[in-house]
Image (cartoon, rainbow, N blue to C red):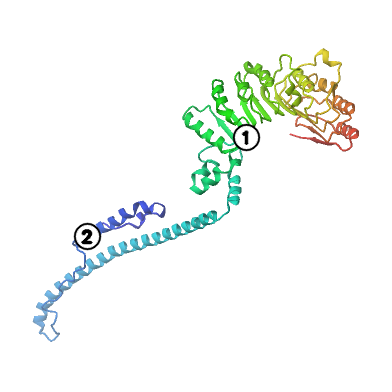
Amino acid sequence: MQTVDDAKLVKFSSFSADINDELQKMVHDIPHIFATDRSQVIIPDLETPYSSFTNDRSDSKLRVEGQSTRAIITERQQQLDDVLHEMSGLKKIVDTINNLHEQLVEKQDKITQSMNSHKRLVSSLRGLPTEILSQIFVYCLPEDSHLSLAQNQAPVLLTRICREWRKVAVDMPSLWCRLHLNLKNRRNLQQQENLYNLCLKRSRGRPLSLVIDCYANQMVKLRNFLQPHGYHISYLSIPCVRGTPEVFGGFSALQELVLNNTTTRTSSSIVTCIMVLPSTVRSLKVTGLFSLNGDLSRIPTLALLTHIEASLCSLSVVIRLIRLCSNLSSLVIHKHASDRIPATDSALVLTHTALQSLRILEAGMSATSLLPGLFNILLLPNLRILEISGSRTWPHEEVKALLTRSNCPLESLIIGAGIVTTDEQRGEYVALIPSLVVTHFIK
C-alpha cells in the first residue's frame, strides 16, 4: 500500500511551487489506504445469530455453536486489523497536512513581516522632505570619481524605482556632473549616446567633470556631442590624438585638462593641444610620453597654468616647463627619461618664485641623472613641499644646496621607500629649516 513518506515533505524554500502536487498526491493515496474508493467510512453489519445468545446452553450445542463463533471472531479480528491499518495510513496523511499547515503559517508570518517592514520604509521615505531625500541620493552614488551611468547603479538606478524618486533625481543637477562617457563600446552605441546626452542635460549648466573614452575616428562626433555643453565643462579627461584640439578648443569654462597619450605617434598632438588651450585652464596633466617640440614661448596660456603633472618627460622638458610656466605652483613628474642638462643650461640658475610643490615620483634613475643636475640650477624661494621617490641614490649635497640657495620656507620633505638616507643627513635638513618635517617611507 502506498503512503506519504515524511522524508519527502516539501521544504519551506520551495514549498510554494510544490504545494498543489503534494496535496494531489495525498488525495491520490487515500483510495489506496482504504479498501474501496469512498468519501466516508461505512460501518459494517456486525450482527450474527449468536449476538443475543446466553451462556445457559447445553454442552453439545455450545460445541457446535463455538466452532461457528470462533470463525466469527477470526473474521472480526481481520476486520479490526484492516481498520487499524487504515487509521495508520490516515494518520500519516493528517500529520503531513499538519506539517504543511505549520510551514504555511510560518511562511505567512514571514511574508507579512517583510511586507509590513517595507510598507514602513516606503511610508517613511514618502514622508521625507525633498531636501532630505536629495541628501540620501547623494550618499547612494558610487565612490568612483566619475560615474559610468550603469543601469544598476545610482544615479540612473534612482530614476527607475518610482515616479517620485525619478522626479527628485532628475531635478538634482549635482547627480549628473561627474560622468564617465565610454564611446568605445559600439554595441547599442546610439542608445548609449542618447542616455549620455540626456544625463548631460540634467546637469543644467552646473560645472561638468567628464572622462571620455573614445577612438580617434570619433573625435568629430564627440566635438558635436559636447559642443552644446562647452560653456560649463570645467574638467575634461580625453585621449590625445590628432583631432583632440578641435574638441575642447572652444570650451570657455575648462579649468582642468587631462591628455591621455598612449603612443609615441601622438606625442606631437600634445603641442597642438597646448597651443589651443583655453585661457581658463589652470591644470594640465599628461599621461604617457610628454614632449615639447618647437617654439612655445609665444603661447600665453602656458604662463597661466598653476599645476602640471607629466609622465615620461625628459630633463629638457622639465626645464622648459619651469621656465615657460611662470605662475606654476605645483609640478609633478612621473617616470621621466634619464638625460643630462643641456650645456647651455648647466651654468644658469633657474629661478621660479611661484613654485610651491615639486614632486618627482618613480624616477628610476642614476645619480648622474635628473636630481643632481636639476637641483644644482634651481632656485625656489617659495618651495614648501618637496617629494622624491624611486631614485636609486639620494643626492644629499644637491638637496642641501637647493635648500640653502633657495632659503625657502620648506614645510615637508618626503623621501620615498627604497631611498637610503641617514639620520645625520635628515638632521642637516632640519638644521637648515628648524620647522621642517622630514618623512621617510620604509618598505
Q: Nearer the viewer, residue 149 or 305?
A: 305
Q: Could you tell me which residue is drawn at 62 percent across and 34 percent down?
A: 208
Q: Amino acid at mark 2?
A: Pro
Residue 434: name its quadrant: top right
Label 2 – label 1 distance at C-alpha: 76 Å
Q: Which residue is labeled 1 in the image? A: 208
Residue 129, above or below 242 = below
- The amino acid beneath tag 1 is Leu
**In front: mark 2 or mark 1?**
1
Could you tell which of marks 2 and 1 lies nearer the N-terminus?
2
Residue 26 in the image: state x and y as whole percent: 28, 58
Q: Quadrant of residue 288?
A: top right
Residue at 55% from the left image edge and 36% from the top image edge: 199
The answer to whether any part of residue 366 appears in the image is: no
Name the residue nearer the viewer: 423 or 273: 273
Find residue 51 and report its horizontal and vertical position in percent: 14, 79
226 or 353: nearer the eye? 226
Q: Position of residue 31 (x, y in %)?
A: 22, 60
Tell me the quarter of the image containing the N terminus.
bottom left
Residue 354 numbered tag: none
| Residue 386 left/right relative to 182 | right
Identify the residue at image location x=61%, y=18%: 242
Position of 306 compared to 144: left or right? right
Q: Secondary structure at mark 2?
A: helix
Q: Is residue 72 above or below residue 385?
A: below
Please tell me which residue lies in front, 420 or 129: 129
Please tell me whether residue 150 is drawn above or below residue 129 in the rendered image: above
Furthest toward the bottom, the residue is 56
Q: Residues within 10 Å of mark 2 (few under 14, many from 20)?
A: some
Residue picked out by circle 2: 31
- Horizontal side of 436 relative to 281 (left or right) equals right
